[in-house]
Image: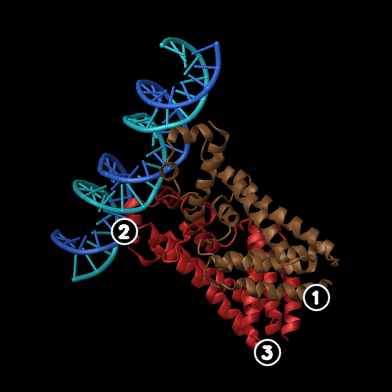
Chain colours: A red, B brown, C cyan, D blue
Amino acid sequence: MRPNKRDELVRKALDVFYRNGFHATGMDMLVRETGVSKTSMYKHFRNKDELMLAVLRLRDENFRNWLYRRIEEISDTPQGQLLALFDAMDEWFQLPAFRGCMFIKASAEFQESSHPIYAQAAEHKRMLYDYFTGVAKRAKMKDPEGLARQLMVLKEGSIVLAMMGVNKNAAHDAKRAAASLLDIHL
Amino acid sequence: MRPNKRDELVRKALDVFYRNGFHATGMDMLVRETGVSKTSMYKHFRNKDELMLAVLRLRDENFRNWLYRRIEEISDTPQGQLLALFDAMDEWFQLPAFRGCMFIKASAEFQESSHPIYAQAAEHKRMLYDYFTGVAKRAKMKDPEGLARQLMVLKEGSIVLAMMGVNKNAAHDAKRAAASLLDIHL
DNA sequence: CGAAAGATGTACAGATCGGTAAACTAAAGA
DNA sequence: TCTTTAGTTTACCGATCTGTACATCTTTCG
C-alpha cells in the first residue's frame, strides 16, 4: 500500500464524481475507471463515504490553491484582488470541463446537516469567506466582514447561473456589482 | 384513473424528492410514502424521469406563484418590489422546511445539458429573470436587463449560502447589496 | 344481474447498489 | 531463502434499483 497509490485513486475518483455526481457514481464504475480491483479500493477506503470525503479534501486543496494564486497573479493590491476574484471565476466558467462547484453539488446531494460531507462542503465556503475577509481588511474597507459576505453571495450566485447554463457570463455581472459595492465600502 | 389522483401523487412526490434528493429517492420509497401501488404509479407516469419532470413543473408553478404574490404584497411600487424579493427570500430561508432550491439541486444531480430535467431547471431561472427584467423596466431603471442579471446573481448566491448553512442571513446581505445597485441604476 | 373496463396488489425480473471472503501472485526485507 | 505485505482475481452477499406480468378486485354501464 504505497502512499501515492491512494492519492492517485482519489485524483481519479475526483474526476468521475465531478462529472457524474455522487449518488450516480457507483463503486463498480470507480473500480472500472481507475483500473484497480474492488478489494484494493476497499483496502484504501473503508467505505464510499470515506472516499468521497477524501475527494472533497483534495478538491478543496486544489481549488483554493488555484484561486488564491490566480487572484494574486492578476492583481497585487488588495482592492484589485477583490475584483480579480471574478476574473478568476470567469476563467473557470469558460473551461470546457467546467461543471459547477463540487461543494454546492455535494451539499445538494447530502442535505442532512449532520452528514460529514455536508459539513465538509460548508467548511470550504467558510474558508473562502475568511480569506476574503482578510483581503478586505488589508484593502482598508469599512465593514470587511459585511463586504466579504456580499462578495460570497456574488461569487456563489455567479457559479450557480453559469453551471445551470442560464448565464455563462455571470462572472461579468457579478464583477460589475462587486465594483459598485467596493466603492461604497472604501 | 381520476384526473386529481395524478396531481396528488405529484404533490406527495414533491415533498419526498425535496427532502431526499432525486437519485437517493427510489420508486419503492415513493410507493410507500404515497400509499399507492407500484403498478398504479407506473400507470400514471411512464417512468421515474416523467414523474420528476411533473414534480419540477409543479414546484415551478407553486414557487413562482408564491414569490410573485409575496413580492407584490410587500411592496406596491416596482422599486420596492425589487428589494422585496430579498425579504421574501429571507422568509423562505427561515422556514424549518427550507432545504434549498429544488432547481439548483436538480441541475446538480442531472448535469448533462441535454437532460430534460437540466433544461427544465434552467427554464425556471430564465422565467424569474424575465420577471425581474419586467419589474426593473417598470421601475424605470437604466439597463434593466443588466440589473435583473445582477439581482439574479444575488438571489442565487443567497440561496446557496443559506442552504449550505454558511450564512442563514444571506438574504440580508444580498438585500443591502441590491439596495446599493438599485441606487446606481436609478 | 352480468359483462366490459379500469384500477389494484403481489410477485417478480434483471441489473446494480455497497461491501466482503478467500485464495492467489508478486515483490520486498530480514 | 523465508516471511511478510500489497495487490490481485473471482465469486459472492443481501439489499435496492427501475420496471413489468398477471391475477384480482371495483366500478360502471347495458
Q: Are both tags, 1 and 2, on one chain? A: no
Label 1 to label 2: alpha-carbon separation? 59 Å
Mark 3: which secondary structure? loop
Co-location on one chain, circles 2 and 3: yes
In the image, B18: left or right of B66?
Answer: left
Quadrant in the picture for residue B37? top left
3 and 1 marks in contact (CB < 8 Å) = no
Would you place residue B157 above or below residue B55 in this image?
below
> Chain under label 3?
A
Residue B19, percent from left and from top = 48, 55
Left or right of residue A124: residue A70: right
Q: Which residue is mark 3?
A: A140
Instruction: Please name the amino acid that badge 2 sits on.
Output: Lys
Q: Residue at x 67, y 52 (%)?
A: B124
> Chain ID for label 2?
A
Say whether mark 1 and mark 3 are on the same chain: no
Q: In the image, is A9 to the left or to the right of B128?
A: left
Dot 2 or dot 3, earlier in sequence: 2
Residue at 68% x, 50% y: name it.
Answer: B123
Q: Amino acid at mark 1?
A: Asp
- Mark 1 falls on what kind of element? helix
Look at the picture and state if A11 lies above or below B38: below
- In this figure, which residue is indicated by the disc labeled 2? A43
Number of numbered discs on residues: 3
Can you say which quadrant of the picture contains the C terminus of chain A? bottom right
Q: Secondary structure at mark 2?
A: helix
Q: Are marks 2 and 3 in contact (CB under 8 Å)?
A: no
Q: Say which mark, if any, is on residue A183.
A: none
Type of residue at label 3? Answer: Lys
A12 relative to B39, above or below: below
Q: CA distance from mark 3 to mark 1?
A: 24 Å
Instruction: Give residue B183's mark.
Output: 1
